[in-house]
Each structure stands twice: as C-alpha cells, then as structure tokens.
Amino acid sequence: MTRRFTGDRLIVATHNRGKLEEIADLLSPYGLSLSSNADHGLPEPVEDGVKFVENARIKARAAVAATGLPALADDSGIEIDALGNRPGVWTADWAETPKGRDFGLAMTRAHDELVAAGAAQPWRARFCCTLVLAWPDGHDEVYPGTMEGQIVWPMRGAQGHGYDPIFQPDGYTVTFGEMDRWEKNRISHRADAFAKMIAGSFA
C-alpha cells in the first residue's frame, strides 16, 4: 500500500533554486512548507549509485538524516539504447570539464559514440526521472517517470538545458531544445514522475 504524505513540512533535497520553485508550484495545492538543502546549509552527498533510484535515495536519506524531516529527491538523466543505456546516471558527468559543465561537449560525445558504434537510426533514447519521497522512520516511496524519443543530429534549439537540443520526443517533430518550456514541462519525464507521486502520496 502506497503511503500518503500527511505532514506539513518537506525538504526538497537540492541546491537548485529553480528546481525548488518548480516543485513548490507542483505541490502548491497541498499547503506544505518547503525548504531546500541550501536553506539548511546541507552539503551535497556523494552520489555513487549506478541506478537513478539509488542516487535519489542517497540524496533523500541524507536530507532526512540531517534534518529529521521527510525529504523529496530526484535523479534524472538520458539513456541511449545503442550505447547500452549510457550515459544514464552519468549524464551530467559526460559534461564535466575543468572549467565546469559543457553540455555541447556531452552531446557531441553521445553523437560520436553512436556513429563509432555504427548504430542504425533512429537512435532510440529516453529521459528518465526517479523521485524518492523518504520519511524519518526509514520508509520511502519511489516514483519513476520516462519520456521516450530519439537522438537527432545536429543539435536543434536553444531552449531547455542539458541534452535537450538532441532529444526529439515521440509524437513531436521538434526537439526539447526547440520546445516551449511549459509544453516540455507538461510532457517531460519529470512531469510523469510527479503525476505518479501526486496520485500515490498526495491526492
């Protein structure tokens, strides 16, 4: 039986203010007092999982342990079928450089590896998001979301972030990078995961 959330305070285990605002908007009907890792001065935990759910659980559990409050965390990334579902949990790592993250470099790597592998098109892929809602008693609920699509080349569009300019979602002729962000937010992997969480633990 899925556990319903009945408290009035929730830690969103992120230092990303934009993500906190997005989640606050999604959860606004439920009268919660939300705060983030940054509000509590919490460090970033080491994310050494090999699955999205493992990293989301690491982040949620660290926030719970530090504050004694329930916490919500997510982990997300892109899986490319012909690359053995890589980069997956290493989605952001592919963009790391000594000067910070360069997603143009990461997208070029994904394309170059597909070409080097001789992978036939269409290059099937999906964005994944896994939410973990964790309670202080050790219980948690897991809500995975996906958006199926394909990798396209060259990059198209300057909207969104990350790998959005090379990801064309199923049913669309534009990439996430060309799509209005409100439309993207309505159909995205994160929207899928949040819809499941709201239905399971809040509705």
Image (spheres, rainbow, N blue to C red):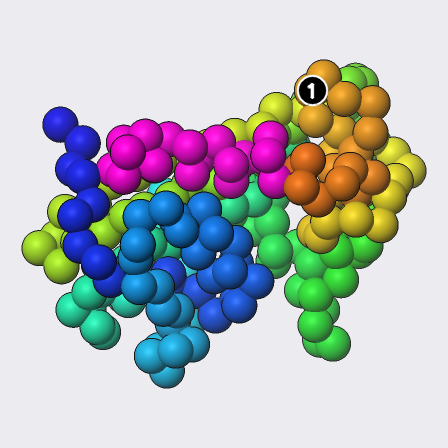
How far across and down, in percent of the image, does residue 84 sit?
58, 31
Residue behind mark 1: 170
The total number of labels drawn is: 1
> Can residue 176 be spotted in the picture?
yes
How far across and down, in percent of the image, does residue 189 sit?
54, 35
Residue 167 left/right relative to 60: right
Q: How crowded is mark 1: few (under 14 residues within 10 Å), some or many (20 or more)?
A: some
Is residue 192 in the magenta section?
A: yes
Is residue 37 or residue 80 the one in the foreground? 37
- Residue drawn at (51%, 40%) of the image: 190
Image quadrant holding the C terminus, namely top left
> Can residue 45 be spotted in the picture?
no
- Residue drawn at (13%, 27%) of the image: 1
Q: Quadrant of residue 14?
A: bottom left
- Residue drawn at (24%, 62%) of the image: 9
Over which residues does the magenta segment extend?
Answer: 185-203
